[in-house]
Image (cartoon, rainbow, N blue to C red):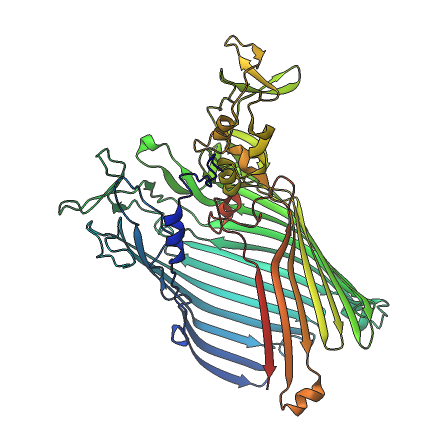
Amino acid sequence: MKSDGEAFQTLAIGGELWLKFQEIERRFYGTPSAADLRKFTVGVTATDGYKSANQGFTFTITNANPVVKKPLKPQSKTDPVIGKFFEFTFDDDTFFDADADVLRYSATKINKDISENLSINTLFGLNANDRKYSSLSGSISSIDVPGFYNLSNSLTPSVSGQYQQHRRLVGAYVSVDLDFRNYLYLNLTARNDWSSTLPSGNNSFFYGGQTLSFLLTDFLKTKDINTGIFDFTKLRVAYGTTGNDANPYAVFDRYVAGYSSHPGFPDVDTLTFPLGGVNSYTASNVLGNSELKPEITREFEVGIENTMFHNRFGFEISYYNKLTEGLIASLPLDPSSGYTSITSNLGDVRNKGIELSVNIKPIKTENFVWDINWNYSQNKSKVEKLDVDEVYIAGFGTGGIYAIEGMAIGQFKFATAQKTIIDGKEFTVVDGKGNPQATTDQELLNKDINEKYRMGLTNKFKYKGISLAATLDFRYGGHMFSGTKDYMHWTGSSPESVLNDRNVFILPNSVVDNGDGTYSENTTPVDPTALHTFYSGGGFNGDDFAVISRSYLKLRNVSLGYEVTPVLCEKLNVSSIRLSLNASNFLLWTPKENPYIDPESTTFGNDISAKFGEFRGNPTNETFTIGLNINL
């Protein structure tokens, strides 16, 4: 609040005009119709006594989001000196996914020629997957007539862009299932894929798996042995491999449209082509890799499933050990080479852990049932081999997450305040003004993205036709970058920004470098504004401050339902009627260091890079629904 009582606003937040503009913001999204989902199936079935075989052709086209139009993307107030109103962008995105089993042949219950105790099911086929994506966009840097959103409504020419992506995967597969006396099962699978996104010499890759299951209780019953309190016991062991290709266009160098940011001309932020009737293209800064190989994952798993006391108690536990060889990722390059990155096979990553699930039915009467499910999982990752010292995965400003050989994947590195150890105690090194000195290189924070473990607890209650269920999720450990904390700290709305009541103070445990290898006690007070500029203030020198705990406890879901009695349903001439109320993600508990954001939020993609964190992301949606289900 200013001295005259007016609310204080930073330049980044904007003013009243921004608020008015937000009121008229519109968004449009395409919705798939029945015409966008097509599936064609032709099949032939033949029976020959004990053998049956079918040969079929299935072709599926799925355009799940055919057209996504966002005529009004998030916009911002432009520089009033230039005199522009608002910038305006139009996007038109189209997705196409076709998946076809061009040949599928299966034979079942092949046992009379072998043994009455052995049953064999076989399946083989050919599969083709074709995926396309196209994007067309246009933008203008100002609008002449406010409220008329059209690319022609500007004195400046519109800037258009187009992107197309096409990939194809063809696979041949076979599966064999063997069943010995209904208690010993063996499943064998194999597949070979040919991918269009890999070099011609490396675009074929083979993988498969084997699973052996033994039903102990069923075996004992064949021997007329009483299983006692055990209703069902199953032992299983499995080993398998899976293959993965790369994103399109990682093999060859390519051209991109010419573009220059801040070219040096007065009042010109960007330089785009065509310019003066002349077009321009330049080599992409991503180097093609003609030696790229498929990524192969090998996994071993062993487990046991068990139910007891007439299904009143049960558990399932498994252990897995998974090694990914030839991990495909983007590797940064020295810009002096003319390129900034290359898609490459960078090394091997191992993940191993346990998964446990327990089911209990404490109470079961004629009218009331109480079910409990508790699950626990723990995973440990380790980068076992890298072809380079470290690999950048994702990040922002002067920080990011990295793969480093011998450590868990996703290690945080940031430029931070310089530290020194004096007589076994850590001190912060400050300059002559009392402000922290930034490190010249990124420092390893000894923090990573991986949780130590996670748990879930679900309780279900049912009394006659009324049911109530609630699910809790708990995650412990791991870290994330929070752009929300960074931003709130910068704008003075975080709890830390009121440090020392915003009065000057001497930074605790700080020293000054004397320049001769020795240090002196710091006696210079620092202005909190300057300190907050270092920590989360535009320069990103101390953004390690915004790396926070990823732990949370969340009430994931609560549902209340009522099933109308069969007598009333019969009078209404329907099979069943169910009313339901559902609420999701409306209660969240986080550690004291994170009063800012839901730890599940991310704005950095949907793969491992998503675990870096979020940059001023939106709050998580709380969902409340009312349902009515009627079966005729």
Q: Position of residue 611 (x, y in %)?
A: 53, 46
> Which residue is at the far front?
4
Closer-to-camera residue (279/28): 28
Q: Residue at x 67, y 47 (%)?
A: 453
Image-based side of 584 in relation to 230, left or right: left
What is the quadrant of the C terminus in the image? bottom right
Image-based side of 389 in relation to 184, left or right: left
> Which residue is at the far left?
277
Q: Position of residue 384 (x, y in %)?
A: 56, 38
Q: Is residue 353 above or below residue 260?
A: below
Closer-to-camera residue (263/165): 263
Q: Position of residue 295 (x, y in %)?
A: 47, 49
Image-based side of 285 in relation to 625, left or right: left
One can see residue 405 in this view: no
Closer-to-camera residue (340/174): 340
Give the total number of marks visible in the rendering: 0
Q: Residue at x 61, y 61 (%)?
A: 584
Q: Position of residue 593 (x, y in %)?
A: 62, 39
Q: Residue at x 49, y 32 (%)?
A: 389
One can see residue 165 in this view: yes
Q: Is residue 368 above or below residue 393?
A: below
Q: Is residue 27 above or below residue 265?
A: below
